[in-house]
Amino acid sequence: MKQNQLAVLLTLSCLFTAGFCANRCCYSQDARYRIQLEPRQRAAANDPETRWYASPVKTVTGVVEQIDEHQISILVDGQTIAQRHSAARLISLEPLDLPDDQRQAIDAFGRQAYTDALTGLIRSVSEKEVSQRPPVWRQQWLSMLASQAAMRSGRGEISLELVNQLDSRPLPQVVVALLPIDWTGTAEATLFDSAAKMASSPSLAVKLVAASWLLRSPKYRPAAETAIKRLSKQSDRPVIAMLATQLAWQTNSPAKLSEDFGVWRSSIDSLPMSLQTGPLILISSTARRLGLKDESKALNLSLIHAAPTWHPDLPTDDRR
């Protein structure tokens, strides 16, 4: 196991020091994507003009020219001038022609064959000529999914190293939303040692992920709670602060959570849509734990049928 982990970590080092930096937009220049964008203005419960008429999610298809933490540029089918949108509005980025290696790795993840998924995802962004690798934003998404696979296969060190390397450059919110945060409160004890070792990392994303795992540890929970509250108050990384603020609800007593449940739910609604799914999974599992049957049922149905974005912890409809 340790030799395999070392091999993967060496591969990651090569990948992130060479591949990401060298490749901006040199792979499949004409590859087409279907993207979904959050409405510019969402309906508000206290606004009589928009209360019943929520703006639809915008879906466009075309060639993505560039995505960074600020904007997405896409040449929409049938147009000659690229559209530019705020990257904060991006909630879905679906390739219409998925390469076989990516498809196989993602299928393995869906089957919960996380070791195979981890290996396949890393290969899909590293074992090619630089000019043949996916564009940077796709590498980032695949690598974040690999960090999820590593966490779910008990390879905490690899998962956190992936997060550390990814966090060395700015990330779109849609990628940050897939950080391997423990939204379900089910982190395995096998992750605790790796999390404790990485808890002092300079990377705020690593700190957040590690603290979320350590909330399950009797030994490290007090330190994890302190770290999460600190991250929620820092202003250097607003997106990290928003996610930490959601995790911080878990530090409240059951009575406080029940009393302020509506406030917590409203705070999730105020988040960008790209960041809502993880916190919704957290509040849904909390409602179930607290015995709030109506709230739990409503949230579970919402996650099954109308989740803002895809997330590996989404519940499934057992009736299917």
Image (cartoon, grey):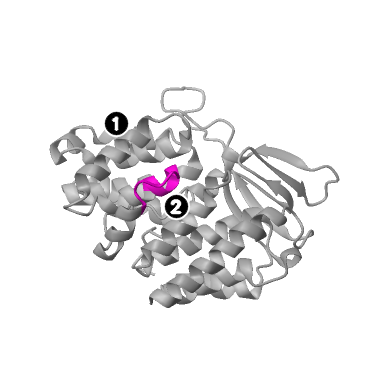
Q: Amino acid at mark 2?
A: Leu
Quadrant, the C terminus: bottom left
The image position of residue 58, as x and y in percent, is: 62, 43
- Secondary structure at badge 2 equals loop
Q: Is residue 252 left or right of residue 284?
A: left
Say if 150 sits above or below 232 in the image: below
216 or 288: nearer the viewer: 216
The image position of residue 41, as x and y in percent, is: 56, 30
**Which mark lies nearer to you, 1 or 2?**
2
Q: Is residue 145 left or right of residue 82?
A: left
Figure quadrant of residue 182? bottom left
Q: Which mark is residue 189?
A: none
Mark positioned earlier in the residue sequence (1 or 2): 2
Q: Is residue 298 something that shows in the picture?
A: no
Report if residue 181 lies within the magenta region.
no
- Secondary structure at badge 1 equals helix
Label 1, on which residue? 263
Q: Amino acid at mark 1?
A: Val
Residues shaded magenta: 198-208
